[in-house]
Image (spheres, coloured by chain):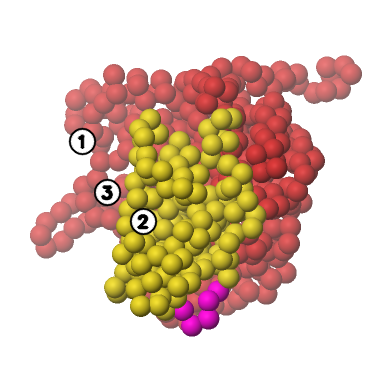
Amino acid sequence: MSELNELYQQMILDHNRRPRNFRAIEAPSRVQEGYNPLCGDRLTLYVTLDGDIVADVAFQGSGCAISKASASLMTEALKGKRVDEARALFDRFHRMITTPPDQPVEDLGKLSVLAGVREFPTRVKCASLAWHTMKTAVADETAGPVTTE
Amino acid sequence: MTAGAAGPRVAPYDVARVRGEFPILAQRVHGQPLVYLDNAATTQKPRAVLDALRTYYETANANVHRGVHTLSERATAGFEGARQTVARFLHAAEPREIIFTRNATEGVNLVAQTFGRQRVGAGDEVLVTAMEHHSNIVPWQMLCESAGARLRVVPIDDEGALRMDELRRLIGPRTKIVAVSQLSNALGTINPVAEIIAIAHEAGAAVLVDGAQAAYHMPVDVQALDCDFYVCTGHKLYGPTGIGVLYGKAAHLEAMPPYQGGGDMIASVTFEKTTYNVIPAKFEAGTPNIAGAIGLAAGLDYMTAIGMDRIQAHEQELLEYGTAALAAVPGLRLIGTAPRKASILSFVIDGIHPHDIGTIVDREGVAIRTGHHCAQPVMERFGVPATARASLALYNTREDIDRLVASLHTVHEVFG
């Protein structure tokens, strides 16, 4: 049970129930689809850029608690960040959730609640879907839909 | 009750003894005794199958249909003996109507790319149902695309039963092939395939029955059904992976072109002309999965020794028990409640994604499948992105169902 409680912490359950920035943005600078074919999770990420600052970011879609909470927490973390900071945060987050569970990881503040996913290798893709989608959204040239495959 | 009134005396179904024959079931997962309820994905293997594979490799391994040496004769006898076992199991008229494939999917593709290319032309139609596995949709889509034909789909009702009125309406003079599952992997619906076959034949269409799910849950008689083709897969029949079966009526198989070229499928080869072998060899190019076929036959023998009728009765009783038990779980909705069902309990729980359910019950040692079950059109029909699915086999027990239900209460606890 302890690993389960580590995964499904209150903050994750709360963001699953009441995802933040769960809406569409009209006329966004970037729109990107993300899809996890393993479980069917889908999301659409909207980003408004002001110069190279993420002025607004929001998402819509359906998915498991982990993917929804991860997307919700990500939108909170990104607002006001520069695009290069957003990309760097992708790398730090990705490192956190893919580091073996017996090794220490960087403290990423609220995002650290998702570190519990390391005990559940099949769920890492759920936690990373929104992040991969964001990375593509803020890349210089946007490609087709992002999948976690 | 006297023994005379009850008919011949049959020993009660001894599920504890059955379980003892499956070594993998004895283990613990996350500290809990394993409850394996993902049988629709693949079944576990009894010792008889594991022993058959080992014995083959230890005493008979050689290539088939080639050497005159003793081991090659043994391997050939084992492989062709397996074909006879499959023919008996499916009640085919002759063993040469049994083609060994990699899996059920390859059987569908073989028929689509040979029989299908011969039969289906521009403006023709292929009919499938809304509950098919992707493996019984995509090969037909590919055929229709290349032939300029149209894929039509028989809808299902809110319980997950096939709309037979729509099927009758959709079958017409342009329908060349009807492809239908006998038992839906996502819903558990049993389709009235004998009736469908009769309707299709009346309209001049041939029928392929996807028996991947059905063949390990109920007796199958391809002659009584009068189907043109029947596909199934070894790893769900308590046999190994990588071996499947295509049954086809001999007259069809003889008229069909080969699927793949190579060794074994030829009678003679020159650079000017190749003469193809007779069936079944014509459809088995290259060295086949010899051990797989022998292991599959051991799985079929294992089921036959218990009795398909008894297996079916045991699983049906469990399905009814499970249906009632799951109905009592708060917020749970069964997806697939057709009047005729077998072995599959597909469900969703309000506000909790199936993937989260799957992770939490796994920590209690309970293995279920979560996702779209390679049947995305079914998920769309019921307006869900995915379901959780418990699927039964001959070794499952009421205790397994009770453990599943208890683990679903844990899901509720975690999600508050």
Question: Which quadrant is the N terminus of chain A positioned in?
Answer: top right
User: Which mark identifies residue B285?
Assistant: 3
Q: Residues within 10 Å of mark 2 (few under 14, many from 20)?
A: some
Asked which secondary structure carries label 3, the reply is loop
Q: Position of residue B360 (x, y in %)?
A: 59, 38
Structural crowding at the residue carrying mark 1, measured as other residues with C-alpha within 10 Å and reported as few (<14), some (14–19) or many (≥20): few
**Does residue A33 appear left or right of residue B191 in this picture?**
left
Residue B27 drawn above or below residue B124: above
Look at the numbered discs 3 and 2 and tell me whether their residues touch, using CB distance below 8 Å.
no
Q: Which residues are magenta?
A: A24-28
In the rendered structure, the answer to whether residue A12 lies left or right of residue B407 reads: left
Tell me what hue chain B is rendered in: red
For disc 2, the marked residue is A90
Q: CA distance from mark 3 to mark 1?
A: 13 Å
Considering the whole magenta stretch, tell me its main secondary structure.
loop
Give, as a three-letter code, the residue at label 3: Ala
Identify the element where label 2 is drawn. Answer: helix
Question: Which of the 4 quarters of the picture holds residue B83?
Answer: top left
Residue under the image location 67 percent in, 74 percent down:
B169
Q: Are marks 3 and 1 on the same chain?
A: yes
How far apart in space, not on screen, are marks 2 and 1 (Cα)? 59 Å
**Quadrant containing the C terminus of chain A in the rendered view:** bottom left
Marking on residue B39: none
Residue B304, image x and y in percent? 57, 29
Q: Which residue is mark 1?
A: B66
Question: Percent position (x, y) of residue B119?
Answer: 43, 70
Residue A27: within the magenta?
yes
The residue mark sitting in front, 3 or 2, is 2
Q: Are marks 2 and 1 on the same chain?
A: no
Q: Quadrant of residue B396?
A: top right
- Amino acid carrying mark 2 in the image: Phe
User: Tag 1 or tag 3, which sits nearer the N-term?
Assistant: 1
